[in-house]
């Protein structure tokens, strides 16, 4: 990722940004939680999908001079799970399933970033309940746009997709009822660092 002032001035949809490198200025970009979402999908009984989200997430994006200098980290509050059914969510949080008392959060730390233009790969490690496994994410860079609010600055948008296997993290409860594979979709916006 490089600092390219010519291409970093895009203010429309991200497709207007088409360079060989992700045009983000260096610095620490802060998450915009109001315009970000952590969503997931899991099979129920093998015949249908249950969709949900985690409503509490903290994330940090540090951009250096090159892709090798980029760092991404995130912490998700597992108790903030929301599948649209309060009774089901309470059961998932309980000790016989997700057990959020013992596993309050899951964390992600990047290890490598590669790609160009709008298509990138984020390699990293996901930790749930003391178990850490590699989880790569396919990332689409949405571009840069100015939020039409005074002082709000420019936002960078990303969509990331990946999947995990519950069994890899010791979350093998309810076999047959719930699938092992959990598909992840992240829609994230980060706010450009303010000039010093």
Image: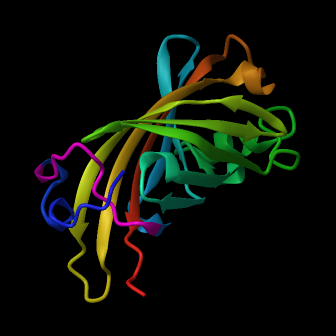
- The picture quadrant where one finds residue 125 is top right
Q: Nearer the viewer, residue 47 or 81?
A: 81
Q: Nearer the viewer, residue 79 or 169?
A: 169
Residue 138 is situated, as x and y percent measured from the top left of the image, at: 41, 32
Residue 31 visible (yes or no)? no
Q: Residue at x 49, y 11 (%)?
A: 47
Residue 127 is situated, as x and y percent measured from the top left of the image, at: 74, 39
Q: Residue at x 36, y 51 (%)?
A: 1
Q: Residue at x 64, y 46 (%)?
A: 109
25 falls in the magenta region: yes
Q: Is residue 136 left or right of residue 81?
A: left
Q: Compared with residue 45, is residue 66 higher up or lower down, i.e. above or below?
A: below
Magenta-highlighted stretch: main secondary structure? loop
Residue 190 is situated, as x and y percent measured from the top left of the image, at: 41, 63
Q: Compared with residue 138, is residue 77 higher up or lower down, i.e. above or below?
A: below
Residue 53 is situated, as x and y percent measured from the top left of the image, at: 53, 45
Residue segment shown in magenta: 16-27
């Amino acid at each position: 990722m490089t600092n390219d002032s010519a291409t970093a001035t895009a203010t429309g949809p991200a497709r207007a940004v088409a360079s060989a490198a992700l045009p983000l200025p260096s610095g620490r970009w802060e998450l915009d939680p109001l315009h970000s979402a952590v969503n997931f999908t899991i099979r129920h009984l093998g015949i249908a999908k249950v969709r949900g989200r985690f409503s509490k997430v903290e994330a940090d994006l540090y951009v250096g001079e090159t892709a090798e200098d980029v760092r991404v980290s995130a912490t998700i509050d597992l108790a903030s799970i929301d599948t649209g059914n309060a009774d089901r969510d309470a059961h998932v949080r309980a000790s016989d399933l997700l057990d959020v008392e013992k596993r309050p959060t899951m964390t992600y730390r990047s290890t490598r970033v590669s790609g160009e233009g709008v298509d990138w790969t984020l390699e990293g490690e996901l930790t749930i309940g003391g178990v850490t496994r590699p989880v790569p994410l396919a990332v689409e860079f949405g571009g840069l746009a100015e939020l039409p609010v005074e002082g709000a600055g420019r936002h960078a948008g990303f969509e990331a997709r990946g999947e995990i296997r519950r069994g890899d993290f010791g979350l093998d409860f309810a076999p047959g009822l719930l699938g092992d594979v959990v598909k992840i979709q992240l829609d994230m916006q980060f706010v450009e660092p303010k000039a010093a």
